[in-house]
Image (cartoon, helix red, strand yellow):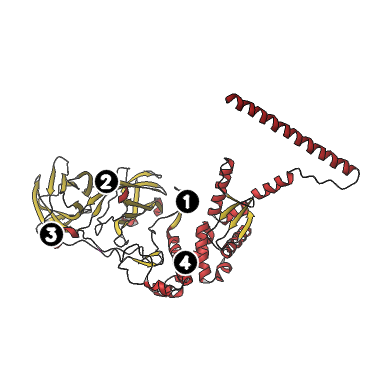
Amino acid sequence: MGKFRRQHAKKSKRRTKKKSLQREEEVGENRRAEDEQMQAGGEPVVVDDGRDQEGENDKKEKMVLLLCRDGVELVVPKEEARRYGGTIEGNIKYDEYSNAYGRSISIPNRGYSLISLSLESDVLSIVIHYSNKKRHDPSWDTTELIGGLHHPTLFRLILGAQHLENRGLLGVACRAVAGMIDGKPEREIRAMFGIRPPTPAPDSTLLRKTTPDDRTMTASELELEKRALRALHIVRCQDFTAYDPKRRAFWHSRFCGYNIAFFDLDEESRFGRGPPLHRVREPSIATSSVNVISLKVRESDVGFPINVFGTIIARDMIDYRCVYLFNRDADDSQVITSPDDMLALMDPHRGLVPEDIIYLEINLKIKCDGGATKDFSRGLTDFNICRLREQTMTASLTTWLSRVELEIAHVRRPLEASISISILKGPSVLKRVEAWTSGNIEARIILYSSEVATGTQMTKACYSITLSRRVVFVPLDEKLVVNIVSHNEDENLVLTLGHCDEEDHRVCKMGCSELQVNVSWTAIPKRETNDWREIVGNVWLLK
């Protein structure tokens, strides 16, 4: 069998070589005949030697066919199409890369590479007009382009520019809409763009995708409403979308997982601490919560020390509103001297409930010489309970000038322990106070450090230590452990406290001082999560 294959391969090679020689002879004879005819003064003989077809193929390789959603096709040079947006440029680059390695997946259409676009032909014509104008006149005033567009067309243009990743045109269109709605209440904006007033929260399951009013609207009216909401969402997102030099791309730095057309991203959550334990039955306690242990600056492009200020905000499924973990202005910045230093976090004003994901918005800046400020860490990360492998998880964010790490511990069936410490007699001898739960001794929360202490508060009988953090979330079946370290670190006091209905007071001595540790216990109750959204068709609108 092997011998037969070798013989067959040799015969095939000889046949191929023979055909090639015959083809060369025919081409040579045709060219000689053409030369003789030209010398005789006659018309040249037109011979099809395949070169015209090859030239036509080369020409088509430099073109691309753009297919719009309404079926309109447009053939344009690839170099011109690249200017229409990053989506087309990315498709062309991938196609060229694939062709170079002989595994193109582009769809041929009459010899052209085909790119399907999720926009209409009239929107594409506006994109082309904008691209050509800006190419020849970078200072061209875009008012004439945007000013004459009706609202539905303007919204389709925003959606189309977003799809094409045309940042220039997207910014122009979004600024136009932002100018229309600036300072107007939600009710007026809805009326302006034909969006119905908000409907009551649905009582049924989260899978519900229509509201009763949808049945009274035509399909085109509902589509216009959904398109307006999506466009307004993109307009809002433009406020916190910027080019991140670390990632070398445009990124959102705030939460926008659902439609935020009318959502106030700066409003704090209206929920607070839970009720005392004696008012809550065990089945009414939330399934889980988290302790945010620490935030550390692991890498700094500007070195150390640095003066850090800004905000860290957490959001959960309860209402997706702000729960601050860090909030300092430039006049109250914290000095970070090494990658092991912890940012002085604050207590969340309520327990965070990770039913699915807790989103963490980090917006940290640094003070520079001369009073100038720079973006230091700016972006969005999350704690996803589905990715949890151990009790403690680290969330990392690499942006702008740094890499920061958040350490977060998961707490099942949580209770809130609020801690306070008073000095009854003698001087303050505390250097550090830390706390953890009996089932997770590695996740230690710093409640007090003399290096960043803010002072004490005097009363008639004693004075209380101002703790930077007071609240620890403890599993129902575990205990709270508080470790108090003396100023010289030669003595420490460890208290193990179980939950109880009444406030727990523990008086103890440390050196020549007498301390009182107070712990009050509250519950994190289960809360309804159905009233944070309004559903319009398949658009989930935060409210």
Q: Which residue is mark 3?
A: 459
Mark 4 vs 3, N-terminal side? 4
At horizontal 44% and vertical 74% (from top left) the residue drawn is 217
Quadrant occupied by the C terminus: bottom left
Distance between the alpha carbons at the discs numbered 2 and 3: 39 Å
At horizontal 58% and vertical 58% (from top left) the residue drawn is 67
Q: Residue lying at the far right in this picture: please name it.
A: 40
Magenta stretch: dominant secondary structure: loop
Relative to 270, 138 lies left or right: right
User: Disc 1 vs disc 4: Cβ atoms closer than 8 Å?
Assistant: no
At horizontal 25% and vertical 46% (from top left) the residue drawn is 391
Can you see residue 184?
no
Distance between the alpha carbons at the discs numbered 1 and 4: 26 Å
Q: Which residue is mark 4?
A: 227
Neighbourhood count class around disc 2 (C-alpha, 10 Å): few under 14, some 14–19, many 20 upward: some
Distance between the alpha carbons at the discs numbered 4 and 3: 60 Å
Mark 1 vs 3, N-terminal side? 1
Q: Amino acid at mark 3?
A: Thr
Quadrant occupied by the N terminus: top right
Q: Which residue is mark 2?
A: 392
Magenta-drawn stretch contains 273 = yes
Which range of residues does the magenta coloring cover?
270-274
Label 1 or label 4, whichever lies nearer to me, is 4
* Helix, strand or loop at mark 4: helix
